[in-house]
Image (cartoon, rainbow, N blue to C red):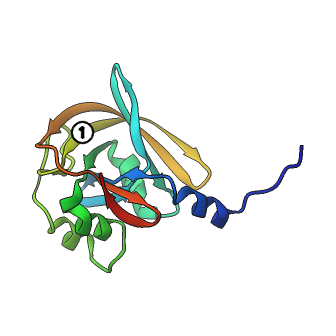
Amino acid sequence: MDSKTVNAQDYRDAMAHYAGHVQLVTTEHEGVRRGVTVTAACSVSDNPPTVLVCLNRSNASNGIFLDRGYFALNTLSVQHQEMAAAFAGFDNKTAEERFAMARWDTLVTGCPTLMDATAVFDCRLIEHKIVATHMILFGEVVGLRETESQQALMFLERTWRTL
């Protein structure tokens, strides 16, 4: 069998064809709020309710999720596209400016939760793994909220889509 090393750019180009539901993972620790737009998040189990989120560990600011031990996963809809772009770092907005783009509250853990998110999973960090460039957070869902369903915000072929 021939083995070929797959280079990172080729991998990213191929993964661009993989549709991802856009979500915002948030936390707050010692008065500092952090939010990151992600597509690498999913359900792990319903008993107990558990989700996972993948975050790039090259960004030192993402360490706050481990320090706090809690996070919220906010499911975005088409109306959140501008905010998703901001939290993805596509502009020069500060964290304060990004959070000012929406209305926030808290559920159980005290993490910021987007009031009009399609769904919010408020989580206690139960485990994390380091895999290559990313850290995978496993969270037990300790609080949950659903709102009226809207068109899902997706990311496919390096652009925003709806479903």
Residue at left offset 26%, top offset 51%: 152
Task: Tell me: 148 left or right of 121.
Answer: left
Please identify the quarter of the rendering in which residue 32 is found: bottom left
x and y percent of residue 26 in the render?
A: 28, 53
- Relative height, residue 96 to residue 12 (above, below): below
The residue positioned 34% from the left and 59% from the top of the image is: 36
Is 62 in front, or is 117? 117
Residue 72 against residue 96 in the figure, above or below: above
Work out which residue is located at the far top of the displayed protein and give it: 47
Which quadrant of the figure has residue 33?
Answer: bottom left
Up-down relation of residue 136 to residue 156 (above or below): above
Residue 86 seen by the camera: yes
Q: Is residue 52 visible?
A: no
> In the current view of this chain or complex, which residue is farthest to the right?
1
Tell me: 157 left or right of 15: left
Q: Quadrant of the N terminus?
A: top right
Q: Is residue 112 above or below residue 98?
A: above
Question: As drawn, is 60 to the left or to the right of 143?
Answer: right
The one of 92 and 77 positioned closer to us in this rendering: 77
Tell me residue 130's x, y (percent).
56, 45
Residue 144 in the image: x percent, y percent? 19, 34
Front-most of residues 154 and 55: 154
The quadrant where residue 92 appears: bottom left
Q: Residues within 10 Å of mark 1 (few under 14, many from 20)?
A: many
* Type of amino acid at the residue the image marks with label 1: Asp
Q: Is residue 27 left or right of residue 136?
A: left
Coordinates of residue 55 in the picture (x, y in percent): 45, 53
At mark 1, the secondary structure is strand
The residue to which callout 1 is attached is: 122
Q: Residue at x 22, y 59 (%)?
A: 78
